[in-house]
Image: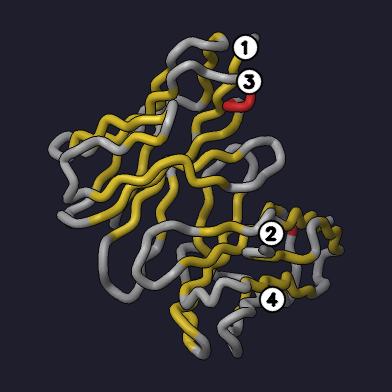
Amino acid sequence: NAGVTQTPKFRILKIGQSMTLQCTQDMNHNYMYWYRQDPGMGLKLIYYSVGAGITDKGEVPNGYNVSRSTTEDFPLRLELAAPSQTSVYFCASRLSNTGELFFGEGSRLTVL
Amino acid sequence: AQTVTQSQPEMSVQEAETVTLSCTYDTSESNYYLFWYKQPPSRQMILVIRQEAYKQQNATENRFSVNFQKAAKSFSLKISDSQLGDTAMYFCAFMNYGGATNKLIFGTGTLLAVQP
């Protein structure tokens, strides 16, 4: 029972590099989310999707892009990494008509 | 816009004692969900308990219970018989009920340390 799977778990990037954080869920959830968690802070919403082909911005979308070509996958793209993007990133999913979010284990990204 | 406030950055409790974590929120909506999530050192986010705003009865899950005061917009978490495994960051969260964009809004968290 995999749930929500994120890769990689850890990554170090140089300023200006690009990368994609992968997120896959096997629960057939329509709603998927990307959050970032800065040290000592709560989670802030970056982007979300209510179904395949539909995405929208959250609170802190600048510097990120997403796509949702399938129900299962919701990758997060960083095009030009900046030190301000050093954070732990969480992907989450949920059924359309319930409130419970299922989270991945997080991806720790450091930009130097 | 909705906001969630956790005014206790850190708390400590002795094993087997009871501790209450505070949370207040601000919304003009009448229907919504409230949650408490636990984040242990492993970083995994784990749902502890949820409360639907239309329900007057406070939610309970084993040693975890909430005190939901809708008029005061307060949603505190009580942990009874604290265990060492309860040591974690606890986040209060709010979500509107219904609509196409049910985003979860988190507070800044309370770090709970259970002392042996």
The circle drawn on residue A85 is 2
| Residue beneath the point at 47% across and 83% down | A51
User: Percent position (x, y) of residue A39?
Assistant: 64, 41
Q: Residue at x 79, y 75 (%)?
A: A18
**Tag 3 subunit:** B
SS for dot 1: strand
Rendering quarter of residue B78: top left
Rounded to the nearest angstrom, the CA distance separating label 3 from label 4 is 38 Å
Quick check: marks 4 and 1 in contact, CB under 8 Å? no
The numbered disc on residue B115 is 1
Letter of the chain that mark 1 sits on in the rendering: B
Along the polypeptide, which appears first: circle 1 or circle 3?
Answer: 3
Q: Amino acid type of disc 2?
A: Gln
What is the spatial separation of the Cα atoms under label 3 and label 2, in whole angstroms?
33 Å
Name the residue that disc number 3 marks.
B84
Q: Residue at x 56, y 71 (%)?
A: A27
Q: Which residue is mark 4?
A: A77
Most foreground residue, A72 or A42: A72
Three-letter amino acid code of the residue under disc 4: Arg
Of the 4 image quadrants, the one containing the C terminus of chain A is bottom right
Asked if marks 2 and 1 touch (Cβ < 8 Å), the reply is no
Quadrant of the snapshot with the N terminus of chain A: bottom right
